[in-house]
Amino acid sequence: MALCYMNGEFLPLQKAVLPVSDYVIQRGVGVFESICTFRRRPLMLSPHLERLARSAGSAGIAMPLPLEDLKAVIRDGIGKMKDECLVRPYITGGDVFVDGEFPSPRLFVLFEKVRKPSPDVYDRGVLLFPVDRGRHTPGVKSTDYMLSYSGHSQCREAFEILYCPDGEITEAAHSTFFLYKEGKLVTAPLSRVLKGTTREIVLQLAAERGIPVEERCPLLPEVEEAQEAFITGSVKEIVPVVRIGDRIVGSGTPGPVTRMLHGTFLEEIVRWLE
């Protein structure tokens, strides 16, 4: 079962439609979030919706609902689903563009059964394909994912592409990237990447366990010097990375720090449910 909240009501997904005049269709103007449920409760709901509001503001898109009202819609939709679900609120540019802003946006929220990566992904680790590009407007979670798909077509065995402008590793197509080197986690600063919600959880867990974190963009040559690497995201949680292009990470198998962080995340997940 999949539902869409649109125009104040919940509809079967196949009955939800947008006019072709909407800027999200004509120019790709829109922002969104991806929120997973665990135990029928949304993970990091407030941080996700706060990021949605920041993304909309940065894109000049008006917020169609107060955040508390949007939370109520999401909780209502989760209650209508039979399974753990992936909730994706979208705010489109609407049909009007005036003085650099989109004052009449459209809101729709998708509710679908969440589909997690297979166990092999966590047991064996994944390959990322590096591309010499950066994500457009990294601080905004926009609907423009064209490069992530066109880049992926160059290496179909890759789990995701990895943005590496001028050899600096920023983030993956749909994930935050972490390198573990010499007892320290290295990840790009927020001035270069999207503020990932799972990223925030990992930073919190690292601080609680005395693992130093260096916020800078690791360089591609450092991959072969690192002991581990992983990516994080709302659906994938914490996924070990064992190869980046032709570079092997550590022993080429998922490492103990990655496994510990993922295990702790799952054991303590109730801390971040709302």
Image (tube, rainbow, N blue to C red):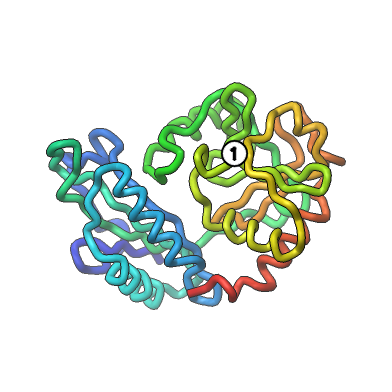
Which residue occupies 76% across, 45% down? 180
Residue shown at 27%/68% (left/top)? 10
In this view, the residue in front, 129 or 115, is 129
Residue 114 versus residue 129 in the image, above or below: below
Amino acid type, mark 1: Glu
Q: Residue 87: give x, y in percent of width and height.
A: 42, 62
Residue at image position (42%, 66%) is 46
Quadrant location of the N terminus?
bottom left
**Residue 9 quadrant:** bottom left
Image spot of residue 215 (x, y percent): 63, 43
Instruction: Check disc 1: other Cα within 10 Å, few if <14, some if 14-19, many if 20+.
Output: many
Residue 150 or residue 185, whichever sits in front: 185
Residue 27 percent across, percent down from the top left: 26, 33
Q: In this view, does 60 lie to the left or right of 143?
A: left
Residue 37: x, y in percent? 50, 69
Which residue position is annotated with label 1?
160
Label tally: 1
Q: Is mark 1 on a helix, strand or loop?
A: strand
**In the figure, is residue 74 to the left or right of 171?**
left
The image quarter in which residue 20 lies: top left
Residue in the picture at 58% in, 36% down: 170
In the visual, does 237 lie left or right of 77? right
